[in-house]
Image: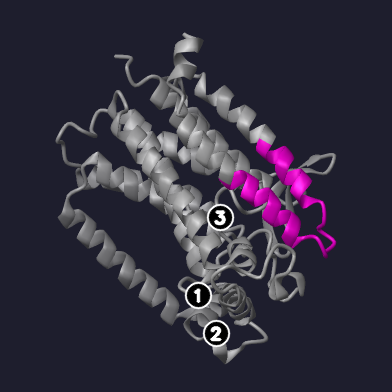
Amino acid sequence: MARRGFRDFDWTLLAFVLVLSVISVLEIRSATAMTKFHGFEVKQLLFLLVGIGLMFAMSMVDYHRLLDVANIAYGASLFSLVAVLIPHVGQKVLGARRWINLGGGAHFQPSEWVKLVLIVAMARFLWGRAGEGKELSWKDVGKACALVLVPMALVLKQPDLGTSLTYLPVLVAGLFLGGMRLKQAGIIVLGLVVVLGIGYGAGKRLKPYQQKRIDAFLNPDSDPKGSGYQIKQSLIAVGSGGVWGQGTNKGSQTQGDFLPIPYTDFIFAAFCEEHGFVGATFVLLLYFLILVRLVQNAQTASDPPGTLLIMGITGVMLFQIAINIGMCIGLMPVTGIPLPLMSYGGSSIIFTFLSLGIVMNVRMRRFVN
């Protein structure tokens, strides 16, 4: 069974992922060479090795078993999100309480693993409806929304707007694949537009830093040394790369310490500065090929839950790619959403490879009835 399973492993998808991961390690090394964060590339490499191991382990567990424990995992995820808000349990850094200190310098960010739990929980909730031509009732839509919006509200309380927004693609993918009608979608979108319009008009309801980020996105020149600094420096870095880039370790904005956190949120801008339009195109092509392989695997799944799982993962990954790159080129406000497989960070890497493990899991069982 194991030999047959690994024969059906998507080695092509893994190859694309590993190429992007190597680029990540090299870019982190370059971006942090002249800073106190020098050596983060070694940690990133360790995160990748752990992630790859977890991916193979996840691929060997029948995904139907994950669906069976979805309710328990969802309850545990809500408990962890509540726990992180409790003083002396959740660790507060820069005004946000997002991590649980595990001791020994290790930290756990519950909001990251909740993304994976939501994907499984949504697939479990819609099991038996997708692909059968059934339409979701308003009651079903309400339950699906509550499934996502409750943990989303808890993450917003931390506050962590960026991570909370990554839960929305799970809801959108689930509703559309689960049989939501276009009329229902139109009403929901209209309601969101009204709510967001009212929320932005009453800016005091947002956190001050969130309001500043939105203002900086709409008009970065209004405060180029303050709230608009990140976007301005990112645009300068991307533009200064030209066609071929300035070369590794030669980025004026990156090595000059003008570009903020070039190894996490703005790693794409740092890469563009050093490798130019050609390098950026190559990275975008890799992301495109990864997304195509994910969709292909979803299409060949043996049952609707398998399709829902992969498309939920695809939706989250596409959303993160679009938001992060859009942020770097000034098309999106700064949200702190990492670029999958590129940005430094253990939580993001572990989530991505566990997700890929589920994809491989579904693929390896596509011929099982």
Quick one: label 2, few (<14), some, or many (20+) residues within 10 Å?
many
Q: Earlier in the sequence, mark 1 or mark 2?
A: 2
Magenta span: 20-48
The amino acid marked with disc number 1 is: Gly
Q: Quadrant of residue 242?
A: bottom right
Residue 157 visible in the current orientation? yes
Residue displayed at 68% across by 44% down:
346
Tag 2: residue type? Pro
Q: Would you say 15 lies left or right of 263 here?
A: left
Q: Is residue 251 above or below residue 40?
A: below
Q: Which residue is mark 3?
A: 339
Q: Position of residue 16 (x, y in %)?
A: 51, 41
Front label number (3 vs 2): 3
Q: Is 42 within the magenta?
A: yes
User: How was the colour assigned to the protein in this rendering?
Assistant: one colour
Residue name at image x 37 percent, y 76 percent: 197
Identify the residue position indicated by label 2 in the image: 220
Mark 1 or mark 3, earlier in chain: 1
Task: List the residue tagged with mark 1.
Answer: 330
Q: For mark 3, does the 10 Å Cα neighbourhood hold few (<14), some (14 to 19), or many (20 or more) residues?
A: many
- Discs 1, 2 touching: Cβ within 8 Å: yes
Label 3 sits on what residue type?
A: Leu
Residue 209, x across and y down, in percent: 61, 74
Give left or right: position of 45 versus 313: right
Residue sitting at the far front: 244
